[in-house]
Image: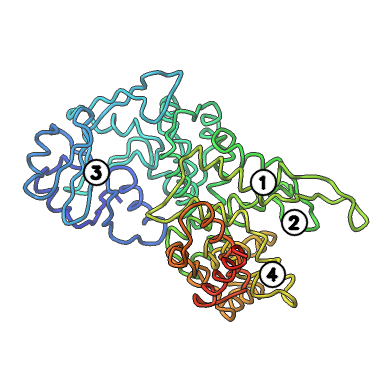
Amino acid sequence: MDKLDIPFRDKDLFVRLFDGDVFVVGGGARDVLRQEHGPKLAEREHDDLDLLILHHTVEEITQRLQPHGRVDLVGRSFGVIKFTRDELTYDIALPRKDTPKNRDVRGHKDFVIDADPELPIEKDLGRRDFRCNSIAVRLADGQVVDPFQGREDIAGSILRLTNPAAFPDDPLRVLRAARFASVLGYTVDPDVYAAAKEMDLSGLSVERINEELFNILMDSPQPSRGLEELFMLSALRQLYPELFALTLSIQDSEFHPEKDRYGHHSVWQHTKNTVDQASRLAGMVGITRPEKLALLLAGLLHDVGKPATAAWEFKRGRMIITNYRHDTAGEKLACQMFDRFKVFSYRGYDLRGTVLSLVRCHHRASELWANRDVVTKKAFNRLAADIGGEIELLIYLDAADRAGRDGKPLTGLDKEAKWLLQKFQELNVTRETIQPLILGRDLIALGVPPGPGMGRLLKELYQMQIDNTYETRDEGLEAARRMLEEEKA
């Protein structure tokens, strides 16, 4: 196929304004070319379509675009423009050369970027990371510009370096390799591993690191693929020592029969299995994107405390590997990792608090099931309060953790998860029912002044509520009156 049509809403506008000088580059061209070798893709109407315009300065491009939408200059000196029209945004760039400022210490922004409208398009494509991304398609006639045989790599679903000498100039490319392998299902060429092994990732911003990890978790058909690539590309060792320790920690094969392709019963293999199962469950139950991210991060970190708590113990007639209190140890390690990467909220959702509580409590749901013949509503209330009302997410994590010991992909919730969901519903234990019934203003009305004493009283009253001592506000107020009378006596 010598010509390639890339359909998108404003194609005719760009061709009218810039004729044969405007090209779709990078992922936009790659994804359309993938249709030659896989299922058809939907028409691109995303805000990540990258365009390259030759033979025009930033000022000329801006002048032509302004009558048709909003133009934002991301960087005049290096020739990058964002053009928004009817809520769709396009990234527009001039051909450019990237030169690292300091080849000894490199971060994603450590470049001298030279935009040159007259730079040959082949030179611009030569600075890109992988051959499958070093492709351009001219909008006017669909002519494909492929100086590095990127179409061959797309056909073979493989990531190869465009320029081995320039690849180490941008350490973000290591994380992009893991994401492309995971999201696109591509094989990584051995030369990429060799190049990545020598690269220093310490200069990367936490925002870009988080973005790549979150995309691997949420956009991959099988997130474990990207996680394993992070391990093989030496990124896990550099960026996530807490996770790297899982690769060196073994588990008891009787309780964890799952193993990697080399026969190792590692915590890392169980963790990857759990994340994949959690991803499958997220797709089945229809949770929001922030909730999915919380669930998958919790799956990734739920056993992060195991290496530090691993011990041998003689039980059941043999030596067994134990990991007592790895849940609370894991919460501390996860907290340290979130501190380091500045993970707090995601789209207004308390990502940090939710994940940490899920890691801390990830065994508690199974304990309810194990004691189902004697367990009371009080235990359900306590667990719901301890996880901030994220009952369903905890049950999904528990189910994924359990299924992580089995190589079979989940097709739905098992009987334990279904029982837990039903029991919470039967007992009417929800996010709403665990909210405090007695507040500070109620105690003020009873004559209690604000201060530490009020705080202690509120805490004690809430514990009574969670312990099912009272179930209504009136009952709570009566309990408060009795406590105040006892104090006076």
Identify the residue at image location x=46%, y=18%: 104
Label 4 or label 3, whichever lies nearer to me, is 4
Q: Which residue is mark 1?
A: 329
Using the image, tell me which numbered label, if any, was put on residue 368: 4
For disc 3, the neighbor class at 10 Å (few under 14, some 14 to 19, many from 20) is some
Identify the residue at image location x=53%, y=58%: 295
Distance from Cα at disc 1 to Cα at disc 2: 20 Å
Q: Can residue 222 be seen at all in this image of the molecule?
A: no
Amino acid identity at mark 4: Leu
Label 1 or label 2, whichever lies nearer to me, is 1
Q: Which residue is mark 3?
A: 91
State the image coordinates of residue 414 (x, y, percent, origin top left).
64, 73
Q: Is residue 80 above or below residue 418?
A: above
Q: Which residue is mark 2?
A: 256
Provide the secondary structure element on which disc 3 rests. Answer: strand
Viewer-proximal residue among 306 and 101: 306
Q: Can residue 304 be seen at all in this image of the molecule?
A: yes
Q: Is residue 46 above or below residue 237?
A: below
